[in-house]
Image (spheres, helix red, strand yellow):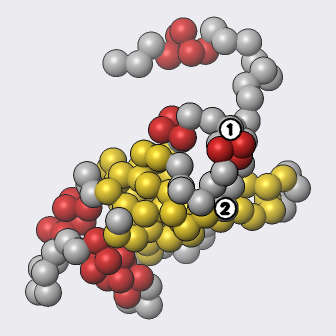
Amino acid sequence: MVDFSSLLRKPAFEAKKPEVLPVSPNYLGIVTSFEVGESQNDKKTPYVRFNGKFLAWADDIPEDERHCDITKRSWRRDFYLTDEALFRLDEFLRALGVGSPGAQYEEIIPEVVGQQVKVSVKQYLNKRSNELANETADIGAV
């Protein structure tokens, strides 16, 4: 179990924000877990979230731009579970080659955990902080 008391004894206001990763569609990653939940807005839209870790830098990122240990960075990708959006989850599952026609999502989704994937990382401007940040744009088969 995590010892929260030691984590909370660190000096406040000294935490360093991770640097923004360079844009690339070719990061190597692995899906480590999934969770289901609902959005925090008024709509409470249900979703499935896939969490993962990076395994390696994208080959198209030059050495001088590799500013961190990429294996200590994580990513996530959400798919809304509405009739209008389920096709995106279907495309993701097909791309990874999991499941079969006729199977239910609750049977297929756990098969994604442990899959190596190609992670597409983009950047966006955070409107609140006016700083660049990363987002996981897409996840596909290796």
Dot 2: within a 10 Å radius of its alpha carbon, few (fewer than 14), some, or many (20 or more) residues?
A: some
Determine whether 89 is above or below 37 in the image.
below
Image spot of residue 103 (x, y percent): 12, 79
Image position of 25 (left or right of 51):
right
Image spot of residue 20 (x, y percent): 71, 48
Q: Amino acid at mark 2?
A: Val
Residue 25 numbered tag:
none
Q: Nearer the viewer, residue 128 or 18?
A: 18
Alpha-carbon distance for marks 2 and 1?
Answer: 13 Å
Dot 1: within a 10 Å radius of its alpha carbon, few (fewer than 14), some, or many (20 or more) residues?
A: few
Which quadrant of the view contains residue 64?
top right
Q: Amino acid at mark 1?
A: His
> Which residue is the site of mark 1?
67
Q: Earlier in the sequence, mark 2 or mark 1?
A: 2
Seen as rendered, the residue at the extreme right is: 130
Instruction: Give the SS element for disc 1.
Output: loop
Determine whether 21 is above or below 12 in the image.
below
Q: Nearer the viewer, residue 35 or 137?
A: 137
Looking at the image, which residue is at 26% across and 61% down? 112
Instruction: Give the SS element for disc 2.
Output: loop
Determine whether 69 is above or below 11 in the image.
below
Q: Nearer the viewer, residue 25 or 100?
A: 25
Image spot of residue 31 (x, y percent): 34, 53
Which quadrant of the view contains residue 67?
top right
In this view of the protein, can residue 108 be seen by the observer? yes
Image position of 107 (left or right of 125):
left
Q: Quadrant of the N terminus?
A: top left
Q: Quadrant of the C terminus?
A: bottom left
> Which residue is the site of mark 2?
23
Image spot of residue 125 (x, y percent): 80, 62
Image position of 49 (left or right of 125):
left
